[in-house]
């Protein structure tokens, strides 16, 4: 049966044929595997489990996308397709002009890297089916195990069913990192600016080496592979040589293991090679995209993307359609990318699902230690921590907190991560991840005119007169009353609330977003305490402070949460970003937040809450500024309320400076 046709098979006596999983896709070393047997075993071993239910949910969602695409396709008229074909023809001319056949790129991929390292450390494993991991999950499998259908990202208990003699070896990342460093020493000899794809793969621009030494790309690849084998003491790798990185990666997989493939830098050769290549061989086209293209548009090869380009431009965004068209023409990146500053650093681990809180906190401590070690190794310090959880039912949850200072300390990371985890318990978890972002390098290059919320918050002074006169010294004194770790720090996103020193300053109800809750959630609720604790700290710094009670109030607008409709489309602006574009999605969320805050500050707006209507700080300040003679207010309000009006807490820093200038 042709791979991918099973999705349309609905034989009641053979239900596994319609059960599509990543485990049934061929990988290097699995050419002779009985795919139907593997599919049946995976189905029978998974049936009724939380994983099975999650796969069924994703399968139903994928079918909805396919039907939706078919409906849109059926509504296209011949005139529409003719117009889009003109767009395709124009784009082909434009992208063909960028084709560069002058460069020589080499993609090197280590063979079953983790398993090979373990075999090198323990020669008794040689020739035996072995997998790195455990019964819960496999990181990789050697080529002997792959003959049985065992592969990476497969639960170990399913792998054991496929291969009863399978040997499990625990994961040892320090060992793999050591051998990865050895391979990278070799890569630097050929391209000091090589691009590391992961621990076990890299892209090298060997154009200059070939020219200087008068050798072909194939000869350089042979030499590099031999050097890796010698430097590591026996590890093998496979290589692909082509005119761009996209083609080089495809080529490195052709003669695995311990082989290489060279694609000549000739347009006709490239077009012949790419035209019959299955679309799943291309990096960036995964299971869902493959099925949408195959089942909805009958696009199975890269050549089909060019032939049906009008459909792609009619049904996908221009960026996606441009990518598909470039793939169909065999075009890829040829330039050495500019060094991009890292946006985040993370560490996560998968384990057998458990609700044991002691064990979960132990796992959290290990991950915090690993993350801290990685940050210190790269000399990074960050102030935003994100906790990622995957429950036993494969539900993804995340919580985030912004710290008041930059840190890479495992103690700091663990302290705040523990608070985030505690808020989710009790729950059965199978994956924990920690991510640190917003590095101090970013802060140094940030816009100095961009203010933070703490600049807009003025604590209650010793008298109403001081505040009405906008005494800047009072502002400085109130700031000094709070230490660095006690300053109020709130960062807002569509699904995250961050905080520091909650018990002393502000208490809030943090909402964790789940796939089911995300569409229902329309606003975040923030619980605000009367500022007794804050006022006590203020009294300690200013002996003449009044004993009035203060209340911390947020003037940030409530905003509709950003939701990725169908898993990839932004509900606020319609832009499409795949789930794998994690950093890009976070930046897009930040963009909407900044846009909302800018609109709130620049124009009048109102926000209704369950208890009251709130005016923006700019409206309040504008009204005060219009009064030529500020009025003193008595402590006791007319309505008998003991609370201080909201405008007494907020004042623009530039207004302070202007008033000071006028006084002088």
Image (cartoon, rainbow, N blue to C red):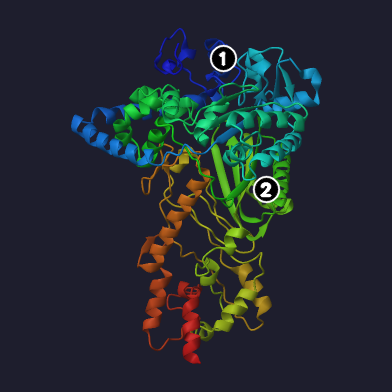
Q: Residue furthest top?
A: 13
For mark 2, does the 10 Å Cα neighbourhood hold few (<14), some (14 to 19), or many (20 or more) residues? some
Q: Secondary structure at mark 2?
A: helix
Q: Residue lying at the far left in this picture: please name it.
A: 79
Q: Whole-Å distance between the Cαs marked 1 and 2?
A: 46 Å
Which numbered tag is attached to residue 31?
A: 1
Image x and y of residue 425, in percent: 63, 41
- The picture places residue 21, in percent across and down from the top left corner, at 51, 22
- Looking at the image, residue 44 sits to the left or right of residue 12; the answer is right
154 and 241: which is toward the camera: 241
Q: Residue at x 61, y 18 (%)?
A: 29
Q: Which image quarter holds the N terminus? A: top left
As drawn, the label of residue 418 is 2
Q: As rendered, which of 529 and 524 lies closer to the eye?
A: 524
* Residue 636 in view: no
Mark 1 or 2, nearer chain start:
1
From this viewpoint, is residue 648 visible?
yes
Q: Residues within 10 Å of mark 1 (few under 14, many from 20)?
A: few
The residue sitting at the front extreme is: 214
Residue drawn 57% across the image and 55% down it: 498
Examine the image and state in which quarter residue 94 appears: top left
Residue drawn at the location 41% of the way across and 27% of the way down: 268
Quadrant for residue 136, please give it: top right
Image point (44%, 18%), residue name? 4
Q: Is residue 515 above or below residue 597?
A: above
Residue 537 as seen in the image, left or right of residue 565: right
**Marking on residue 464:** none
- Residue 516 spot, x, y in % from top left: 46, 38
Residue 271 in percent (x, y) is at 41, 27
Marks 1, 2: nearer the viewer: 1
Numbered disc 1: secondary structure: loop
The residue nearer to you, when weighing 116 against 220, is 220
């Amino acid at each position: 049966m042709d791979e991918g046709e099973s999705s349309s098979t609905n034989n009641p006596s053979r239900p596994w044929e319609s059960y599509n999983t990543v485990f049934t896709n061929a990988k290097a070393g699995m050419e002779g595997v009985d795919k139907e047997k593997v599919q049946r075993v995976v189905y029978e071993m998974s049936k009724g489990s939380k994983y099975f239910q999650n796969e069924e949910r994703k399968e139903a969602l994928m079918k909805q996308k396919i039907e939706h695409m078919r409906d849109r396709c059926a509504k296209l008229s011949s005139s529409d397709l003719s117009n889009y074909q003109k767009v395709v023809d124009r784009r082909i001319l434009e992208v063909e002009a960028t084709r560069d056949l002058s460069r020589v790129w080499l993609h090197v991929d280590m063979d079953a890297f983790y398993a090979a390292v373990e075999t090198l450390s323990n020669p008794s494993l040689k020739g035996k089916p072995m997998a790195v991991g455990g019964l819960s999950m496999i990181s990789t499998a050697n080529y002997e195990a792959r003959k049985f259908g065992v592969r990476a990202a497969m639960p170990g208990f399913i792998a054991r069913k496929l291969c009863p003699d399978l040997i499990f070896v625990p994961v040892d990342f320090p060992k793999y990192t050591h051998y990865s460093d050895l391979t990278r020493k070799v890569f630097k000899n050929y391209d000091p600016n090589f691009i590391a794809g992961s621990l076990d793969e890299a892209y090298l621009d060997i154009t200059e080496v070939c020219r200087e030494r008068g050798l072909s790309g194939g000869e350089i690849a042979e030499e590099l592979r031999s050097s890796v084998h010698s430097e590591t003491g026996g590890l093998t790798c496979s290589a692909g040589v082509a005119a761009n990185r996209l083609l080089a990666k495809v080529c490195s997989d052709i003669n695995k293991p311990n082989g290489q493939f060279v694609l000549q830098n000739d347009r006709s050769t490239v077009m012949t090679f790419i035209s019959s290549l299955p679309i799943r061989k291309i990096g960036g086209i995964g299971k869902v995209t493959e099925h949408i293209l195959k089942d909805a548009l009958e696009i199975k090869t890269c050549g089909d993307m060019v032939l049906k380009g009008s459909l792609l431009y009619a049904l996908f965004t221009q960026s996606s359609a441009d990518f598909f068209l470039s793939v169909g023409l065999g075009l890829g990146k040829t330039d050495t990318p500019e060094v991009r500053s890292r946006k985040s650093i993370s560490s996560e681990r998968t384990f057998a699902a458990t609700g044991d809180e002691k064990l979960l906190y132990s796992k959290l401590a290990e991950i915090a230690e690993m993350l801290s070690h990685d940050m210190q190794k790269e000399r990074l310090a960050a102030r935003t921590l994100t906790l990622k959880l995957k429950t036993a039912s494969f539900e993804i949850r995340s919580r985030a907190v912004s710290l008041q200072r930059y840190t890479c300390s495992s103690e700091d990371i663990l302290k705040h991560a523990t608070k985030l985890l505690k808020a989710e318990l009790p729950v059965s978890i199978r994956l924990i991840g920690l991510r640190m972002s917003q590095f101090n390098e970013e802060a140094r290059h940030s816009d100095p005119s961009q203010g933070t919320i703490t600049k807009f918050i003025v604590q209650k002074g010793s008298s109403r007169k001081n505040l009405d006169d906008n005494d800047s010294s009072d502002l400085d004194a109130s700031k000094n009353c709070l230490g660095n770790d006690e300053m109020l720090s709130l960062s807002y996103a569509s699904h995250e609330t961050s905080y520091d020193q909650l018990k002393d300053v502000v208490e809030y109800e943090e909402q964790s977003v789940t796939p089911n809750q995300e569409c229902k959630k329309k606003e975040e609720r923030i619980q605000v305490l009367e500022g007794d604790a804050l006022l006590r700290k203020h009294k300690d710094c200013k002996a003449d402070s009044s004993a009035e009670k203060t209340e911390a109030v947020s003037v940030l607008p409530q905003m509709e949460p950003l939701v990725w409709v169908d898993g990839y489309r932004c509900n606020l602006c319609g832009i499409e970003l795949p789930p794998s574009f994690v950093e890009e999605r976070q930046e897009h969320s930040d963009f909407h937040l900044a846009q909302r805050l800018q609109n709130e500050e620049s124009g009048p707006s109102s926000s209704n809450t369950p208890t009251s209507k709130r005016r923006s700080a700019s409206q309040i300040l504008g009204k005060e500024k219009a009064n030529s003679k500020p009025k003193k207010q008595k402590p006791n309000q007319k309505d008998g309320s003991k609370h201080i009006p909201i405008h007494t807490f907020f004042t623009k820093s530039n207004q302070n400076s202007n008033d000071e200038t006028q006084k002088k």
